Amino acid sequence: MKTLVLVFHPHLEKSRVNRRLMDIAEETGDVTVVDEYAAYPDFRVNVEHEQELLETHDRIVLQFPFYWFSSPALLKQWEDMVLKSGWAYAGGRALEGKEFMLAVSTGSPADSYTHEGSHLRTMEELLFPFAETVRYVHATYLKPFLIQGVATASDEQIDAAVAKYPEALTA
Ligand SMILES: Cc1cc2nc3c(=O)[nH]c(=O)nc-3n(C[C@H](O)[C@H](O)[C@H](O)COP(=O)(O)O)c2cc1C
């Protein structure tokens, strides 16, 4: 199985988690890692290139830090441009049989993403637009890989969470 990790982080130079996730993914066999903000700093996504990347991999991981209860803007731009009618849906089935997994880091802790917690909604609820997009393009939505509470986590806690990434990418 060939895995593609598309990383959407606008400030990787300041990253505590996503940079480490990228590094460990790059050391994992049969995994291709792409820094999408480095590829498209002007948001002019090369649709043909991105579609070819998707076509030539079996599992696609969309990795990003949670920004305003969603993703950084380039991922939305990427979806809007790459998931074309006639290719991904509306007669197109280029992504049928592919697996999609989100890998998301959040500053707030896991217990704040509950109905009783400070953010009122679960991660599953907040990530629903991604799950529904994946279903709409005839692909399979895998359980997200979450690293939560980054704002207050110790280095040891981050180390332990990052170490679980290779298995999540390939299992
Ligand atoms: C613009 C912006 C918006 C953010 N919005 C959220 C948010 O809605 N929920 C949350 O838990 N963390 C939020 N954060 C915190 C980031 O998710 C957190 O810093 C990031 O996941 C850590 O990963 P990194 O070390 O790779 O940057 C936000 C951070 C920024 C800069």
Image: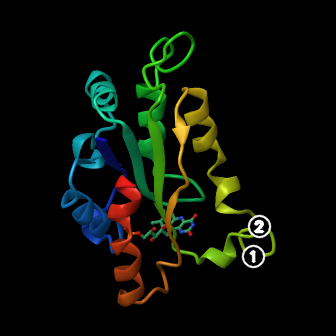
Which image quadrant: the N terminus? top left
Residue on which the image places disc 2: 120
Q: Residue at x 47, y 33 (%)?
A: 79
Residue 63 at what x, y percent from top left? 40, 54
Residue on which the image places disc 1: 117
Is 101 placed left or right of 30 in the picture?
A: right
| Image: 48 above or below 34 | above
Q: State if disc 2 and disc 1 touch (CB < 8 Å).
A: yes
Residue 33 at what x, y percent from top left? 25, 49
Is 141 placed left or right of 170 in the picture?
A: right
Hey, what amino acid is under mark 2? Leu
Residue 151 at what x, y percent from top left? 48, 81
| Image: 111 above or below 137 | below
In this view, the residue in front, 160 or 33, is: 160
Q: Residue at x 73, y 75 (%)?
A: 118
Hey, what amino acid is under mark 1? Gly
Q: CA distance from mark 1 to mark 2?
A: 5 Å
Q: Is mark 2 within 8 Å of ligand 1?
A: no
